[in-house]
Image (tube, rainbow, N blue to C red):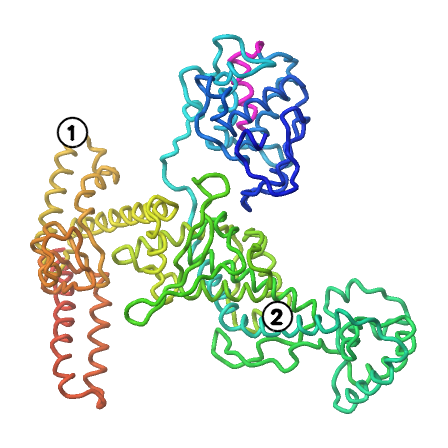
Amino acid sequence: MCEIAGLRLVDGASRPRFEQDRWVFSGLADAHRMMSDHEQIWNFTWIANPRWRVVAKEILLAMLAPQYEAVLECSHALRAARSPRTCFNFLQRYTEWFNWLTKQGITALEDVTQEMCERYLEHYSWSVPVRGRPRRRLEPYSTVAHVRILKLIAQYKELLSSDSYETGFVPWRGKTATQVVGYKSKGPNLTPPVPDSMLQPLLATCLYFVNEVGPHLADLMDTARTSRADTTASGSITLAHLPALRQILALMRADGEPLPAVDDVQLRKRSTLEQEGPLKRLGWEALARTVGARRFGDDARRRMIPELITLAAEVGFEPPLARQAAAIPRLVDGELIPWTSPLAEGDLVFMADHAVTACLVVTCALSGMRTSELLEIEAGCRLPAVATPGGGRRFRLASRLIKGQKFGGVPDEWVVIEQVDRAVALAERLVNRPAGEALFGTIDLAGRLKNLRGWLERTGNRERWGLPVLPQGPLNARMLRRTLSLAIAERPGGLLAAKIALKHISVATTEGYAARPGGSQRLFHAEIEEAEEAHHVQLTVQAFRDVQAGRMPAGPGARGLIEAFHHVDAQLKDAAGTDPKVLKDDRHLENLLRKQAKTLHVGPANFCWFRDPSKALCLRLAGTPNATKPLVGMCDSARCPQATHHPCHRPVWAGQATAIDVFIESPRVAKGEKARLVPERDRALRVVAEIDAAQAASVGED
């Protein structure tokens, strides 16, 4: 099978053969991590009718190997190879279809009719019954595969040897699978973004974990690993070790040092035998390591119990790790606190696991990588940082691009911001895996965050570190990717994303998506541009509504914008004469304003309506009059004839004037510098006055 399909196998792997009813692909050399273990085992015995097992085998082999000689002779066969993961999903659908026919009493495919196909599709167009809940109709994209596998049997009729449809029969003849179910693949992105009420506390918590707690936690993990490695070859404590142990216990008594305590999980699992009652909190393994052993022998344990009970009554118990923890600032108020309370070894493992979750969230939220790409991140994936002009650095991660590529994917690189590089570096230290192994393992963000939320509350670390409460709600990698794309789109120029204030987050991230034209990065950039266009239409409609209500814009380009909006308003009034409903139709208004919206470029303190490049002040100053986009960073909106100021821009200009006043009044600023700042302040105040005057005029007219 693998030889025909051109699939590479690792040395010693099993080689599935066509006549077998169980194909095992667990030895595929190019299998990516999105392909789970159960998807690598194809069990055709799930199909009740033995004749139809052969049908499924022949179709799936043809999809895996479209260049095979027998498949090339099939005139309607698919010519692009499908991946083993896709074919496994088709096997599941064929199992459902064939077993459904068996339940209907059908034993030969030639008896299949269009009416049966429609009944089958209707049956699988509804959700699985759940007690106490009504069934719901599935979305069209969930049922396309059910139609597709039915039509494939007709497409591969020339190839099938055991059974096939009646000659001339094609389910839903003349219609594609998507047309049958009404699925439109070019619709809007339905993935919802993560709301700010959830995103902000989530990123604040995870970044605090990575930046403040993580370095100390990684150091403690290194120390614990070294301690375990030193005692790996050691045996149990025997009677011969007791004198040395008693010396250590004497020092603990003298210093008032508590005995090592076990973690809460182990405490709950412990036996409650009477003789162990007073010592059930004792960490026997941790105490054994104080004399270089792994555990207590039975004889030594029995001999030491009375002495340990006496000592425990004097000094008590406390987890042995991080008793003198370094101080870190609380997130909420900056107060210095120990980074953790004392930990047992089990507590340390749990904390490290939750820290890896924080690293995963930061990487996912601030890089925009897909789940398949996150899964391909390996230990040792961080590439050397590249210096950039101005003293900055670009950080890169090596991964693999899976979607839309040949089976196994292709190597890919992602340019990320420093916080992502730091999170990946921390995760590498915490998991301590050899280079080439998966770094994060599962990408189940919903389950991981549920555990993180419960652990923060249960241990009291959320209050200790001054972290916000993590709200409940759905979350996955796709939602975080969608959120990042919208954040980039809605910032000035579509480049400055700022869900949180980090170093050049949008510039570095966008550079990563633009680095490989034609790949996933280009698709993500197209999604950004689509969202940016919708946002610009929304801003243009709002500006039009303001003019309709008498709230006029200010700035050099205000007159031209008002005239354009009056022209659109006249078109609406003309349309109202023939169809009164048009005036209430926002879609019609958006269509009229779409051309105007395409000229809009959002600046931090103005709107630039870039209709005529020859009039753009920034292009004239830069000496590039033929450019197709304005240079927003060089914008002087107080003088540019295509710039407008709106009420939403007033706080920016007023804030600039206030900030300049602080420098002018400061005795530390040189007189020459103050003289240079005065015109800047006057310009800001003039813009504020113009905005206020425009609003006052509209109020006066009302």
Taking the view exactly as shown, the residue that stands out farthest to the top is 167
Q: Which mark is residue 578?
A: 1
Could you say which quadrant of the image residue 119 lies in? top right
Quarter occupied by residue 314: bottom right
Location of the N terminus by quadrant is: top right
Other-residue count near label 1 (Cα within 10 Å), few / some / many at <14 / 14–19 / ≥20: few
Amino acid carrying mark 1 in the image: Thr
In this view, the residue farthest toward the front is 11
User: Does dot 1 land on a helix, a strand or a loop?
Assistant: helix
| Within-10-Å neighbours for mark 2: few <14, some 14–19, many 20+ | few
Magenta stretch containing residue 219, yes or no? no
- Between the residue at mark 1 and the residue at mark 2, the CA separation in whole angstroms equals 67 Å
Say which amino acid is labelled 2: Gly
- In this picture, is 133 found above or below 663? above
- The C terminus is located in which quarter? bottom left
Q: Position of residue 639 (x, y in %)?
A: 9, 64
- Whole-percent x, y for residue 437 in the image: 57, 55
Tell me the residue at 24%/72% (across/down). Answer: 655
Per the rendering, the mark at residue 460 is 2
In the image, which residues are magenta?
110-127
Task: Judge left or right: residue 682 versus residue 478.
Answer: left
Percent coordinates x, y for residue 96 in the rendering:
60, 25
Asked if residue 674 lies left or right of residue 517, the reply is left
Label 2 SS: loop
Q: Nearer the viewer, residue 357 or 469?
A: 357
Q: Residue at x 66, y 41 (%)?
A: 12
> Sequence order check: which comes first, mark 1 or mark 2?
2
Q: Nearer the viewer, mark 1 or mark 2?
A: 2
Image height check: is 131 above or below 333?
above
